Amino acid sequence: MTATLPVTRPAAATIRGHWIDDWRPEDPAFWAGGGAAIARRNLIFSIFSEHIGFSVWTLWSVLVLFLGPAYGVDPAGKFLLTAVPALVGSVLRIPYTFAVARFGGRNWTIVSASLLLIPAVLAAFLIRPGVSYSTLLILAGVAGVGGGNFASSMANINAFYPDRLKGWALGVNAGGGNLGVAAVQLVGLFVLAVFGAGRPGLVAGLYIPLIVLAALAAALAMDNLSQARTEKWGMRDAARQPHTWIMSLLYIGTFGSFIGFGFAFGQVLQVQFHSSFATPIDAAYLTFLGPLLGSLIRPAGGALADRLGGALVTFVNFIAMAAGAGIVLLAAHQRSLPLYLVGFVALFVFSGIGNGSTYKMIPAIFRARHPHDEHEARRLAGSVIGIAGAVGAFGGVLVNLAFRQSFLATGSADAAYLAFIGFYALCVVVTWAVYLRPSSRRPVAV
């Protein structure tokens, strides 16, 4: 007999174990009679699991700070170590999106949370001076499993909530997960402060009991929805939509920047201002602030998009991101650490706002294109969110490769900053040309 937590069930729902066969969130009576409580409970534990997933995914943004001279890894090699999990995580987002429909949201959360044990255990016991660089690359690549959790978590929570609450629920779910990037920075800071730079395995080791707790909590407190089924040809049809790839490009600029800078910020700070930091702990004190603010402000981007329109918020946001990258470039030339921090924190904040506003644009685009077919609009929007999420995460790879190539070619990050400014300028032009320029053919209410 399977143990379960005492929970409220809607009287009309059909329950089979942890499967709910009758789920009607748009029905006010059903929602008020217990549906809201079930959705809220699943949201809470989904956030917990996704949060741990983000922390494991970005674990190497912290671990590279521990790789001193004894490991023989130069800055270019460290950027590659952070690019690899970003790449693996972006690739896994597509199958993780489908996994919820195939196995059930609860069941897949148990599996995806349990998989996090592999990179955590390996990193906890295998990272030590003398380990080969190829082994480090493998360990970093395995951490990419944490990157897929976001896609499956969002697909699962999307099915639990009525349309009027989806924006709020998805914003809270995404923001809570993104906070894992800042949390792992704080864990790294704790280990550096208490145990020093010689114990990198402890960072991963501290997550092992949390991973077990996340898997157990999902098993005891979450549910599967029989009706949460991905359309068989949804991804195929979405891939044929030009707006799928336009929004994927914009999401590279927002989420790709957030996760890419989350991976790279600590080591860029150390390389560019190494004379300002006597030990890695000095730099670590500063690395968590940007990811923290970028995560907390993500729901505000969605709220602004609700009020002002997603395209307008995204357009202005990319201008602000280009300005932030310009400040970072200027600070690097002037060797001004305070100005550098201001510019980088601004990049995190505006990437967080853009994460919310671009996600809000997707359903609006397809509602405008299919005003008389709500099912088709939902079907395409759901698939596009999955594709854009995967492509956007690949932006994290590009950010780290840009830093790596810039340091290899010029010995500084200036070329990378110029590339970011150019890309944000491209996103400004695309957003205006496709979604804001006066035209009878462009989507409305975006």
Image: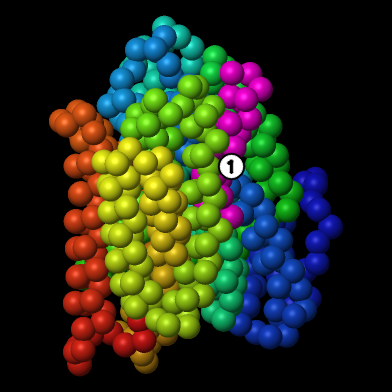
| Residue at image coords 56%, 58% | 296
Q: From which residue to which does the magenta span run?
A: 176-196
Visible residue check, residue 13: no
Query: Is 192 within the magenta?
Result: yes
Looking at the picture, tell me which residue is in the foreground, 412 or 335.
Answer: 335
In the displayed structure, 232 sits above or below 62; it is: below
On the image, the x and y values in percent for residue 125 come to: 55, 16
| Residue at image coords 36%, 90% | 371
Question: In the rendered view of the protein, which quadrant contains the N terminus?
Answer: top right
Query: Is 370 within the magenta?
Result: no
| Residue at image coords 63%, 37% | 211
Disc 1 is placed on an element classified as helix
Query: What amino acid type is highlighted by mark number 1?
Result: Ala
Visible residue check, residue 301: yes
Q: Quadrant of residue 184?
A: top right
On the image, the x and y values in percent for residue 215 come to: 65, 42
Q: Quadrant of residue 169?
A: bottom right
On the image, the x and y values in percent for residue 82 come to: 37, 33
| Residue at image coords 49%, 25% | 280
In this rendering, position of residue 111 left or right of residue 4: left
In the displayed structure, 38 sits above or below 176; it is: below
Q: Quadrant of residue 366?
A: bottom left
In this rendering, position of residue 396 left or right of residue 292: left
On the image, the x and y values in percent for residue 398 come to: 27, 44
Q: Which residue is mark 1?
A: 183
In this rendering, position of residue 344 left or right of residue 429: right
Query: Of all residues shown, which one is farthest toward the top?
Result: 130
Question: In the rendered view of the protein, which quadrant contains the C terminus?
Answer: bottom left
Looking at the picture, tell me which residue is in the foreground, 362 or 109.
Answer: 362
Instruction: Give the prevailing secondary structure in the magenta stretch.
Output: helix
